[in-house]
Image (cartoon, coloured by chain):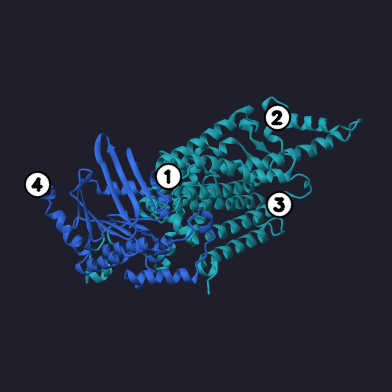
Amino acid sequence: MSTLLEVSGVSVSFDGFKAINNLSFQIGNAEMRAIIGPNGAGKTTFMDIVTGKTRPNEGRVIWGEKSVSLLKMSEAQIARAGVGRKFQRPTVFEDQSVFDNLLMALKKQRGPLSVLLYRKSEEDTAKVQELAAEIGLVDQLPRKSGELSHGQKQWLEIGMLLAQDPRLLLVDEPAAGMTPEEREHTTSILVEAAKTRAVVVVEHDMEFVRRLNCKVTVLHEGSVLAEGSLDHVTSNQDVIDVYLGR
Amino acid sequence: MRKSLFARNPSVLIFLTCLALFTLGVTVLSEAFGTDMISTSFVKTLGKTLCLCLIALAMDLVWGYTGILSLGHFAFFGLGGYMIGMWLMYERTRDIIVTSMANNPIPPTDSEVVAAIGNQIFGVVGSSDFPLIWGFSHSLTLQLILVVAVPGLLALIFGWLAFRSRVTGVYLSILTQAMTLALALYLFQNDSGLRGNNGLSGLQNLPGLDDVPQSVVSIWFLWASALALGLGYIFAAWVVSGKFGSVLRGIRDDEARVRFLGYSVEGYKLFIFTVTAIISAIAGALYYPQAGIINPAEIAPIASIYLAVWVAIGGRGRLYGAVIGAAFVSLVSTWFTGGQVPSIPLGFYTIDWVDWWQVVLGLSFVLVTLFAPKGIGGLFDLISGRTSPNRHGQDLGPGAGSLQEQEAES
């Protein structure tokens, strides 16, 4: 299996505090990975580094077949290269309709001029409809997304992520604020997505991680503590110490 | 079938109809038409108001839709005015010089004519040579290009520097204001080449058209301003109606999120900043021939702040709101400051509206911001019943969240 993203020896510190300490991580083209770890383990900072929001002090982040470095690219360029991100809190454009939100995320030319001259095609409308069906928001398409419930906003954001058609999905706590049935649905969408692309899920909820049934990376104090199947890492003495206290 | 721009935005057609009716009405009632119900000076005031509506439209694009509170758009407006003013002043002075020199025993050479024009225009700042920036002032075409090019280029360079370093929010506002102030202070200098604080004057006289009365000229400019406003409105509606508008509003609401969708936020900001600067410049180029005079005080930061106040009172984030705000506030302002409103004697103090108007305007700005953030344009929502549910800022939780607030409470 070829590697899609390789993070090696990355460190970043904020005012002397080492948020990420010599972290190495890699993920293949069609792979699901869960990242767990206590608060402050550096999970979100890790995502910030991959998406270009935070620049590491040292280390390398290598992407794709051509092995390009993501460190020199802007957030927008990284997103266009195929990294999609879902935030912990649902961030959708509340003032705009669900349809417009999805249309904006749809994989298309992103330059100002081509967007200005963009004309909505039948095909794009159909694509949006299809995505809306997948996330169960067909009836809500004309509504402003600010009127949606918390759970529906989570859905919408997952839909926008899928619309981008990224090669790597970074998903931060996708199931927060969802009912058990909704969690079930989220799991199936993520598992489905991982068949064709790489998916990294950051999650606190062990039950949710168990259902994803994938390799798990445990972060602690900015570096990898353990890696392997969920049963493997939960029987690891270091992990038990970190999670349950010494 | 894809719906046309007008079908998707019925307000565009309504607006254009109102604008056409207004222009027709003013024309019919004007002195030029013979009815003489509206004085020429008031026709000019109305024409100028249309130009102010156009720049308010630009401000709404950049602030109301994209969230960049620019306090510098009147600088572009003024620059547009200066660019057209240079040609108007040069040509008109040339006409006068040529006429007066025609009686000379020896016909004047071209260089003598130019020297005389220079003496006439720059005598007031103690100079007689043409500065370099007047190099194109003999040609209407070139100066018209400069109307668009100079403010456009300034906006492009300024915007590129500011947006590239990700200056946002109030810091960007301060930066734009500093740019405006710097430009005004520079123009105030006598050796800036644009006649210092005297500015350019006599712009109401169109060269070569001395026998056309001002009453007719004022109607021409009213039409030109109305046309520009109409085209500007269609353009703005087109820009904000499609996906581009979605991205702009996305940038206003959550810039970082737009970036993670793969859009280069800086490019979009630069685009809209430059385009609106050009629209402002065109508005200015139509405004100052009607005002007759332009000086650096017009560019002072306070003018751009007023612009923000108009748009806020009219209702930002909707095009007709900006137009209504600019028209309403600037006309009321003209009325109050024109000394036509009777003072109110309180016995111990007399409220003189020329002085107190500013206080009323400031107060209404505060009140609108606090109690009617949608501005005057928000009234149209009340009519069409398009109000959002009042959730007191709370999301409904999972499960029940798929219900509307009313349903959830019952």
Q: Name the residue under label 1.
A: B362
> Residue at the left extreme?
A246
Quarter containing the C terminus of chain B: bottom left
Q: Which of A225 and B166 is in front in this view?
A: A225
Chain for numbered disc 3: B
Chain for numbered disc 1: B
Q: Name the residue under label 4.
A: A245
Mark 2 → mark 1, Cα distance in angstroms: 39 Å
Q: The cyan chain is which one?
A: B
Q: SS class of the residue under badge 1?
A: helix
Q: Can residue A121 be seen in this view?
A: yes
**A181 lies left or right of B211:** left
Mark 1 → mark 4, Cα distance in angstroms: 60 Å
As drawn, A159 above or below B123: below
> Residue at the top extreme?
B126
Q: Name the residue under label 2.
A: B122
- Counting residues from the start of the chain, the first of labels 2 and 1 encountered is 2
**B372 lies left or right of A231:** right
Chain for numbered disc 4: A
Q: Name the residue under label 3.
A: B215
Q: The blue chain is which one?
A: A
Asked if labels 3 and 4 touch by Cβ distance under 8 angstroms, the answer is no
Q: Can residue B351 be seen in this view?
A: no
The crowd level at tag 3 (other Cα within 10 Å; few <14, some 14-19, many 20+) is: some
Chain for numbered disc 2: B
Residue B71 is situated, as x and y percent measured from the top left of the image, at: 48, 42
Mark 1 is on which residue type?
Gly
Mark 4 is on which residue type?
Gly
